[in-house]
Image (cartoon, grey):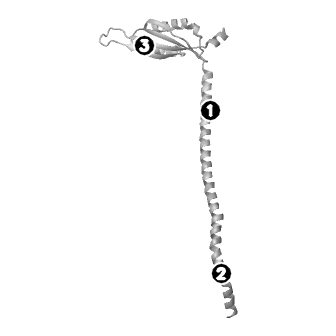
Amino acid sequence: MTRSQRSHATCWPVHAIGAAVTPALTGAGYLFAVQPLMQTQHEVAKQHQILAESRSKTAEANELIKQLRSELALLRDAAGASTLTLLPSHHSNQRLAALNELAASHGLAVETVRTGTIESGERFELVPIHLAGQGSYQACTSFLHALQKQYPDTGVTTLDLSDNPGDPTAATTFTFDLTWYAAPALSSAAKN
């Protein structure tokens, strides 16, 4: 055997060991280095997606907050600009007389006018007012229109108009249940 043949013969086990160890090292490298790196990259990508969604939701929430603050400022300005001053509920007789006069000026014949039980709130008192009588449909609508303009602190809770279609000369009967928003008792006591 020549020297070169002997060198190849003695290297053969080294090459065989190298051929066996290389796939094992490659597998171990993949298992312990590449695979964890790929899993980490996948987790990082998921975290970036969650972060992007969170940022988008935060931006939407901030825009909604901005819009609501703008609306609140407009409402506060409107409330501050309002010249409506609520009268205390102990002025109910004057209010009833004024409503009766308004109804009469629009052609309504009021037969019943009375207040109900007052409900107290923090910012106002609710005074129920019941009006009933007779008049034409046009007189009723005219009265309600004037009521809204002259007494913006009074709202219509229910209304009932009844007519007899068989008798064109019969008057229309009406029933209006109103709610008068009056100043709360404490603020009216403080003003006196």
Q: Nearer the viewer, mark 2 or mark 3?
A: 2
Tell me the quadrant of the picture where the C terminus can be found. Answer: top right
The label shown at residue 69 is 1
Amino acid type for the residue under numbered disc 3: Cys
Helix, strand or loop at label 3? It is: helix
Residue that extends furthest to the bottom in the rendered view of this protein = 1
* Residue 36 vs residue 119, the one in the foreground: 36
Residue neighbourhood size for the residue with mark 2, other residues' Cα within 10 Å, grouped as few (<14), some (14–19), many (≥20): few
Mark 1–mark 3 Cα distance, whole angstroms, equals 41 Å
Pointer 1 and pointer 2: residues touching (CB < 8 Å)? no
Counting from the top left corner in percent of width and height, residue 113 is at 47, 7
Q: Nearer the viewer, mark 1 or mark 3?
A: 1
Residue neighbourhood size for the residue with mark 1, other residues' Cα within 10 Å, grouped as few (<14), some (14–19), many (≥20): few
Mark 1–mark 2 Cα distance, whole angstroms, equals 78 Å
The residue shown at (55%, 12%) is 118
Amino acid type for the residue under numbered disc 2: His
Between discs 2 and 3, the one toward the N terminus? 2
Q: Which residue is mark 3?
A: 140
From where the camera sits, is residue 63 visible?
A: yes
Residue that extends furthest to the left in the rendered view of this protein = 166
Q: Is residue 138 left or right of residue 188?
A: left
The part of the image, by quadrant, that contains residue 69 is: top right
Q: Which residue is mark 2?
A: 15
Tell me the quadrant of the picture where the N terminus can be found. Answer: bottom right
Helix, strand or loop at label 1? It is: helix
* Residue 103 vs residue 115, the one in the foreground: 115
Helix, strand or loop at label 2? It is: helix
The residue shown at (61%, 22%) is 79
Q: Nearer the viewer, mark 1 or mark 2?
A: 2
The residue shown at (61%, 57%) is 42
Counting from the top left corner in percent of width and height, residue 40 is at 64, 57
Between discs 1 and 3, the one toward the N terminus? 1
